[in-house]
Image: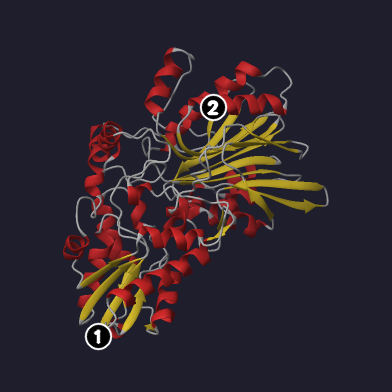
């Protein structure tokens, strides 16, 4: 999971890119990078760390130019060293800099073809560098000295034919303009915005609409599945569908957890979707447990707060903030390694004892993935004096790996995999457990939005929209990307090489 942004402006874009990345920080807290174009010169700064730590004043002063792209990363495919941070760059053709959100499911095959047939060189294990080289190869095959929109569209069409998986891409062609495209299934989100200035129009492409809000851009629309957008340096926007429509199937986990509630994705308000999740969950609890003895509803901050508040309203129960969050601790779900996630939960949350003492408490969370956070939070509630601790998830049981850009590679790391709801309840230590049904979740997110007929809900259903995920692939993925595999790779590295940075 990553956050991407690209701007073609009439004024320097370095500060705008920085500001956009700060509001997309929730999508990746491992590394950050910005590349700007100043004439035919590329300025690049990228490194492991939060946005505020990677970019100092001296770096910002060197990021000159009226066009640029930015990226925040949480590593899924590839390693977590600074050299794997984005954007990536190749010098042929023209010079291309690329940032990517998602995962390629045929990355190994593409890597072999790039090395053996296309004669491209790869420096990292990142699938984003693979995608960059595929795009560069296809663009070189059709372009000439004067890059035209049709060259871009032909190249993206060829990319869609070769590449599988979930991907949202922003690329900067040095001296020419910005290219953005989204996979034919529309799994990973991407929006287009515009603002007027005294010097003329400026355009932005970003993972979430919240990046547009903070910069004063107007949300024009979502980038369509399979569509390519080319914005030249004069500000002209060219667009074309470059793939046979396979249906718009956005990742439903964006609405459950990943996106900010103030974002609009595929014309659906994340905030309203989470309100409806709370309503559906409340209806299920009342239906299955009409004589409940719940005294108070307490959310697990922050992503479950919206659902929990609406649930409490529907059930006519008290809503209380029982946990105080340390804002300086990152999102534990996307932290690498089980031990780090366990340690971070206690550092991130602290219980307010008076809200728990001698009460029957219903805790609401957005989802239960590995069960680490849920178990520790329930323990904290009991330590604070709760009489009974009930737990409810706004999402269904996560039983299957998500392969399209979310780090759930190993099924055996998922607490609900191969287990009943009661077994999960026993493992996390709750007195009673309620899950949202998949049908209710889909209805909550979709509501009356006719353009979205189905979602990628593979982590709940095991049905993968790209239709290319086999048991053998999942086994291979687990070997490569599980916590155990990542720990082994880190231990095998004798030294951690210093990244070669441009700035």
Left or right placement of residue 384 versus residue 147 in this view: left
Give the mark nearer the N terminus: 1 vs 2. 2
Reply above or below: 409 against 423.
above
Disc 1 residue crowd, few under 14, some 14–19, many 20+, Cα 10 Å: some
Q: Which residue is mark 1?
A: 357
| Residue 382 visible | yes
Q: Nearer the viewer, residue 314 or 411?
A: 314
> Residue 443's x, y, as percent?
46, 61
* The disc label shown at residue 191, or none: none
> Residue 198's x, y, as percent?
83, 52
* The disc label shown at residue 159, or none: 2
Q: Nearer the viewer, residue 149 or 174?
A: 149
Q: Quadrant of residue 285?
A: bottom left
Reply above or below: 275 against 148.
below
> Residue 204's x, y, as percent?
66, 47
Q: Residue at x 82, y 47 (%)?
A: 199
- The secondary element bearing badge 1 is classed as loop
Q: Considering the image in quadrants, where does the C terminus appear?
A: top right
Reply above or below: 276 against 295.
above
Disc 2 residue crowd, few under 14, some 14–19, many 20+, Cα 10 Å: many
Q: Quadrant of residue 227?
A: top right
Q: Residue at x 32, y 80 (%)?
A: 352
> Residue 417's x, y, as percent?
23, 51
């Amino acid at each position: 999971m990553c956050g991407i942004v690209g701007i073609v402006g009439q004024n320097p874009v370095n500060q705008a890119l920085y500001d956009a990345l700060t509001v997309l920080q929730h999508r990746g807290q491992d590394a950050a990078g910005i590349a700007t174009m100043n004439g035919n010169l590329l300025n690049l700064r990228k490194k492991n760390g939060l946005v505020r730590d990677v970019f100092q004043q001296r770096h910002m002063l060197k990021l000159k130019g009226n066009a640029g792209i930015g990226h925040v990363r949480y590593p899924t495919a590839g390693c977590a060293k600074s050299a794997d941070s984005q954007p990536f760059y190749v010098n042929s053709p023209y010079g291309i800099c690329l940032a990517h959100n998602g995962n390629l499911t045929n990355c190994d095959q593409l890597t072999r073809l790039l090395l053996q047939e296309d004669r491209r060189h790869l420096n990292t294990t990142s699938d984003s560098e693979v995608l960059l080289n595929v795009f560069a190869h296809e663009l070189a095959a059709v372009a000439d000295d004067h890059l035209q929109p049709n060259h871009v569209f032909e190249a993206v069409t060829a990319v869609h034919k070769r590449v599988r998986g979930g991907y949202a891409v922003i690329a900067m062609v040095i001296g020419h303009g910005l290219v953005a495209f989204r996979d034919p299934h529309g799994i990973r989100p991407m929006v287009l915005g515009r603002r007027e200035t005294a010097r003329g129009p400026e355009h932005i492409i970003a993972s979430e609409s919240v990046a547009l809000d903070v910069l004063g851009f107007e949300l024009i629309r979502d980038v369509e599945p399979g569509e390519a957008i080319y914005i030249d340096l004069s500000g002209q926007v060219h667009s074309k569908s470059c793939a046979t429509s396979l249906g718009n199937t956005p990742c439903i986990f964006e609405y459950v957890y990943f996106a900010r509630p103030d974002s609009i994705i595929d014309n659906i308000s994340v905030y309203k979707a989470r309100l409806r999740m709370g309503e559906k969950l409340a209806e299920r609890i009342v239906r299955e447990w009409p004589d409940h003895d719940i005294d108070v509803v307490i959310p697990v901050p922050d992503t479950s707060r919206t659902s929990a508040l609406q649930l409490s309203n529907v059930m006519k129960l008290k809503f209380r903030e029982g946990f105080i969050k340390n804002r300086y601790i990152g999102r534990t779900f996307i932290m690498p390694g089980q031990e780090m996630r366990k340690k971070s939960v206690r550092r991130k949350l602290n219980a307010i004892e008076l809200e728990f003492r001698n009460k029957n408490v219903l805790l609401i969370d957005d989802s239960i993935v590995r069960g680490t956070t849920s178990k520790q939070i329930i323990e904290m509630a009991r330590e604070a004096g709760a009489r009974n601790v009930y737990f409810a998830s706004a999402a269904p049981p996560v039983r299957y790996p998500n392969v399209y850009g979310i780090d759930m590679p190993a099924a055996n790391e998922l607490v609900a995999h191969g287990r009943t709801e009661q077994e999960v309840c026993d493992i996390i230590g709750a007195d009673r457990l309620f899950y949202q049904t998949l049908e209710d979740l889909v209805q909550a997110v979709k509501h009356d939005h006719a353009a979205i007929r189905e979602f990628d809900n593979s982590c709940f259903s095991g049905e993968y929209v790209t239709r290319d995920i086999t048991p053998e692939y999942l086994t291979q993925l687990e070997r490569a990307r599980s916590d155990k595999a990542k720990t082994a790779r880190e231990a095998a590295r004798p030294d951690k090489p210093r990244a070669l940075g441009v700035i």
